[in-house]
Image (cartoon, grey):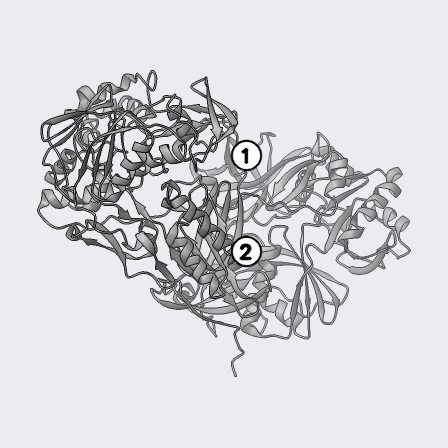
Amino acid sequence: MSLLVNCPNCGPREIPELRCAGESTSRPKTTPTVRELNTYVYFRRNEWGVQKEWWFCRSCEDWFLAERDTYSNDVKRTWHPEPAA
Amino acid sequence: MSRLEARDGERIDRSQPVSFTFQGAAVEAFEGDTIGSALYAAGRRTFSRSFKYHRPRGLQCCIGHCANCQMNVNGTPNVRVCATPVSSGDIVKGQNFVGSLDFDLMQATDKFAGPFTPPGFYYKTFIRPRKLWPLYEKFLRNAAGLGVLDRKGKREARVDVENRHVEVLVIGGGRSGLEAAITHAAEGRQVTVVDEGPEAGGALLSDPAGKGVAADLRARAQAAGVEVIAPAIAIGIFEYGFVPVAVGNLLLKFRAERIVVAAGVIEQPLVFPGNDLIGVMLPEAAKRLVEWWSIKPGERAVVITADDRGLEAAASLRTAGVLVALVIDLRVEQPPNIEARGRRGRLHAVSVNGETVKADLLVMSGSPQPNAKLLAQAGARVVYDASRGIFVPESLPENVEVVGSAAGDVGAPAVPAAVLGHQGDKCFVCFCEDQTPKDLAYAIAEGFDSIELSKRYTTVTMGPCQGRLCSTNAIRSYAKTKGVDENTIGTTTARPPYTPVPMGLVAGYPQEPARRTSLHHRHRDLGARIMWTGAWRRPHSYGADAGVEAQNVHEKVGLIDVSTLGKILVTGPDAGAFLDRVYPNRFSDLKVGRVRYGVITGDAGRIIDDGTVGRLDDETFYVTTSSTGADGIYQWFGWWNAVWFMDVQFANLTGALAAINVAGPASRELMTRLSDDDFSNEAIAYLDARAVTVAGVPALALRIGFVGELGYELHLASPQAVHVWDALLKHGADLGVAPFGLEPQRILRLEKGHVIIGQDTDSESNLHEAAMPWLVKNDKEFEWVGKWATQQVADRGLRNMLVGFESPSGAMPVEGGQVVVAGRSAGRITSVRHSRELDKVIGLAVVPVALAVDGGRFDVQVDGRAVGMIVRLGHFYDPEGARLRS
């Protein structure tokens, strides 16, 4: 991995300046069953292609989201999450 | 001596003699020589022994491509001495021989073992009888491999890494590379050129007419603002224009918007009997010996060439006084039978179609191959041009271009036959691994008929030259044997690095960062034994006996530097509500000025970290984490709030604040001496947090009791820590104040049964089975992080439990030791220490839940014997907490 990722605050950054926290997941809204909880905690889509991931920038210490192609490492876009309207 | 009179444009400085040793004997050289050129000038012709047959080998490429000149230089094996500048005092030795370089006992393998060592020989042979494998292995391990590492060698080289950002990176500083650089620079771009030679110029440097052109191009490049770095080797082209470049012990990590590959060509050997004899070399080698180092390479030369390179080499040789006895231009005629004959491994004569010419030098030049290795690694395709016998790069990655001969601009060389002769000595396709066309045919007959399979089976292209000199000839050999064309055979996958580089250069960060608290040097001065804890350097203990330090805390007063604790300020109207979500217990109802213990779990229900939370005002909480958890928890909080958007902010004060825990029965007296604040039990009770002034320094005092005695954890600005620490030691001297380290702290907390996250818990631990069910508050409105999984543990029923135990016999189990119940492994010891206060061996262990009752018994293996332990619930020391609250 030697890609550059564009932190929405700090601009393009080398990987060691960032932390990839893996693909974004969706937390259950209400008490999940054992199966639902296991799926949420342990299972990932492991996409071959573009996936949405969490990244942390060690420079500005902010979290942001990225769409990255897991095959080509092409980062399509990065953005700060917005609260649901 | 074969050194010529001084010549125009030579690279050696005869006024600067340099001396080094080879095999213990002194060798004289000049500044500008390489180790290889100096040895050649001194008359040495045998430079190495081949990998398999131990045939003597001499200089072949003089450019650092082939494996023929690998030697041990100053303890580093496999150094290509032909391209290594000589330094005064170098200690150079040959390698891969038994006896001497000139008389290698292992050469018997060439004479006798040849017919018995086809590809795959030892996979097939040394497998039976199985019993003998250890013996075989010992022999084979000794025979395999090239240089030998010095096992006692020190970590000799310091390596550094530097990031560089350029608009255009040009790889290769020959004519086309420099011209491309000048053009880009003229268009206003920032350009860097890297070249693996001693200076930029490429092939021009060994051409009598080209030296001036090279100098002119370098001057123009400099005038245009182009940065030229040499010697510097680009070792790969990766995504996002990433090109690591090795410059000695420095790795330059280039990010280039545009990459121009001008890597030139790789000269190719021809395949005929005796093509590895000493004296058979590539044109550039002959030219460099003459033009760079003013050496007469031999007396009588034969040239066999597919293009002008051989002719140019012949011209250079003539100027050096070498008699060029025969020149065969393969573009004019291809003799069916060429044979090089040798005596003791050295070229003696060349026979062409039966006609024999005496010669001690043979310059061979096959069709020069565009140096597309970097491009192929980067994802380009290479396509065979049958009319010229070369592989040309195509379909380049975005932002990568190729210019000059690397792009296929090599004129119209002849296409030599796959094998130019069949009579006589062995002929080699692969010099590094000693593979002949016969070996390849054998591999095909065995079914390894694709070039990738052949690579793995015969190891052709897998040697130190990384396929530079053998890839094309192997493909030709395959195409001919199988009767198909070269494009059908295809090339093997090119992989980085382009050239061998020291592991240290690419194996990650050369430094191990250490964090030190602001009191670190005080600890050193006090004679502390320093240990690693995560990234931190902390005092293990200050004296020989940690037990004594622990007792001083029980009896008098101790100081421990706990600056390593994570310290996070959580502020905002939603601060309390936020903490309610990330902790199992409740913090929104914590009263201002109070402190509460908290454990953090993930949604998997596993314990991640612990610490205390103090409320400073309605909207401000002061959160401490474990020493190694600070950054992780700070990120954890931010991550959750990136989804929740609560009105709360986090500030990581871990480095900004120091912390000193003042603990022991005399701690109140000590604080009173240094502060005008009221430290009475009424003013600051157990689990209170107060803003105080200590020795004139504002501090936050947390009255908590990790070590089990009355104590105050003082958090204050790091720059003031030394002042406060010194004041505490000075004013507490008559109270018996003494610093204590991590080891006594571990004893003290164990006496209280306090857990250390990561020591007594692991990635599987949950709140219930870590005996902390009292932390779980399920009546909160929000589904706190970890709630569901924690509930599921409760629903499925508990299996294990973290409990205290004592060793009635006094035997000391090891941490991590197996808990044995009814002869079966049923848990493990997580902590164990001897407590001087209790005069007992005590510890914590994970045991089956059925045993988690006071008096439960289990065994632990101690020194191979099962020793009984007894479960003790509750604190070992001060079970009522009277001392904490005193």
Q: How many callouts does the rendering have?
A: 2
Q: Outermost residue, bottom direction? A: A85
Residue B236: image location, x then y, percent: 39, 50
Chain label for disc 1: B
Find residue B814 and name its label. Answer: 1
Q: Is residue B170 above or below residue A64?
A: above
Q: Earlier in the sequence, mark 2 or mark 1?
A: 2
- What amino acid does circle 2 point to? Ile
Residue B486 appears in the picture as rendered: yes
Relative depth, front residue between B560 and B73: B73
Pointer 2 local density, CA inside 10 Å: few below 14, some 14–19, many at least 20: many
Q: Residue at x 56, y 62 (%)?
A: B636
Label 2 and label 1: CA atoms lie apart by 24 Å
Split into 4 quadrants, where in the image is the N terminus of chain B?
top left
Q: Secondary structure at mark 2?
A: strand
Residue indicated by mark 2: B607
Residue B651: image location, x then y, percent: 67, 64
